[in-house]
Image (spheres, grey):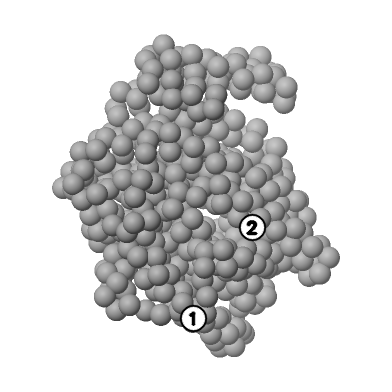
Amino acid sequence: MSESDLGRVTDVFEQFVRDLGLYAVARVVPAILSVVTLVVFTRAFPPSAYGRYALTLSIATILGTVCYGWIDQAIVRFEPHIEPSLLIGNVSWLIVSIGVGLGILSVLVRVIVAPVLGPFEPFVFAGAAVAITQGTYYVLRALLRVRLQSRSVLRYELIQSVGGVAFALVLVFVVLNDIVGWLWGTAIASGATALVLAVQLGFRTDSINIDAAFANRMARYGFPLIGWLVGLTALNFADQILIQLLRGSEATGIYASNYSVVLYGLGLVFTPFVTAAEPILMNLWNDDNDAELAAVITDITRYLLLVGVPGVIGLSALNRVVSGLLLDTSYLAGSIIIPFVAAGLLCWNAAVIGQKAIEIEERTIVLFVGVAMTVVVNVITNVPLIMRFGYVGAAIATFVSFLLYAVFIYVVSRRFIPWRLPWHSLRNTAVASLALLVPYAAVFGLGWGSTLPLVVASVVGSAGYLGAIYLLGELQETELRKLKGMLGS
């Protein structure tokens, strides 16, 4: 273990809460801006245009995930236990090599298959630019995360997200008059932010080198994660591709926009949990504290359930209201998918926390097997369900697939550091969530579905949920004392 990582985590609960708060803020502004751009562009362009944008973004995300995502994961796993210069040298070499390769690939695609691209032709270079710049930015951001520099992560997330929206609006409505400008805006902002971040982290042209032994270890750990990350991307976007093939661009646009509502909304809840938990666990591990790690993983899962269960239930109860508020009326029919996707995302994110013990053991091949099995089930169930029920069938297949993966991790983790689910917390949050639903039921039952009554119902329901959780003994006194101390400091 390198000298730089000693003493990073002094109190797990306080470190987690502090990072969780900062990462939550880091998600709020990008999420709000994403919703704003979603509202603007879905009103300015028809579903078919948004469908082309969504499909291109799906492909760019898959490319970026395949090429860069495993490096992100390897950085978080190895940085606490490796010399910084060794890590930076290998990461620099990988970033440059992958960026050049993707650039060449995009040129070949544009030249060779241009006659069959049709309306997708302007999206080729834009999609490649998004894959390269976002992938590079996420890799560099991982170094800040694993070093527990959550304040710096917040700063760069704000720069990247605000810049992306600003560039997108100018390019879409002033320069290009085309929704492809949304992709170019994202690429420009991500690239500029990555460049500034690289300078801060000490990356230089003379730091580009590769160490064979460490590169081999990274490959053994990371290559199975390529398959895992592709599987994750496929689970998020394969349904959109299948809807495009079986039902067309309009259905894809309706489904993708409502799916995005769930991702943006619950991303405020789930993403900060995983982002905060992962580096803490990797820094905490010392090769001889499996029981301690298992307990911490269970605690973090419990925290996720305390916030995630009411989040899913509340969003599901308000699915038509939220979709109608954020999207044009032509997209409203797709709000029916929100409960299925929301529940599935909760299962998936809980599993991602549970699988960290398997990642610590460097048995990432197990994760690849699990996600491969899940993708196969997803495709097998998606095709007939989409043909029979349209995009609603895709939402059902998404929920089943995410739940299946959570079950897989729960069972397989017993061979490593077991993921012990806090069943009592799951029960308590489910019971307490009834207090959240009662005000909504009253509002809808009385026909008061306007904004003000729903806001009041949300406040009353949230207070009722917190009160029920407290009465059920789910809020521990030691945690409350630490929270009070942190707020007072």
Residue 40 percent location from the top left of the image: 75, 51
Question: Of 29 and 248, which appears nearest the observer?
Answer: 29
Q: Is residue 116 visible?
A: yes
Which corner quadrant of the image does residue 60 belong to? bottom right
Contact check, label 2 and label 1, Cβ < 8 Å: no
Please determine whether, in this image, residue 118 is positioned above or below residue 234.
Answer: below
Residue visible at 72% across and 66% down in the picture: 181
Residue visible at 33% across and 77% down in the picture: 211
Residue visible at 68% across and 38% down in the picture: 324
What residue does disc 1 label?
206
* Residue 210 in the figure: left or right of residue 468: left
* Residue 317 in the figure: left or right of residue 433: right
Quadrant containing the C terminus in the rendered view? top right
Instruction: Looking at this view, name the residue that lies furthest to the left.
Output: 415
What residue does disc 2 label?
160
Residue visible at 61% across and 65% down in the picture: 196
Looking at the rendered structure, the kind of residue marked 2 is Gln
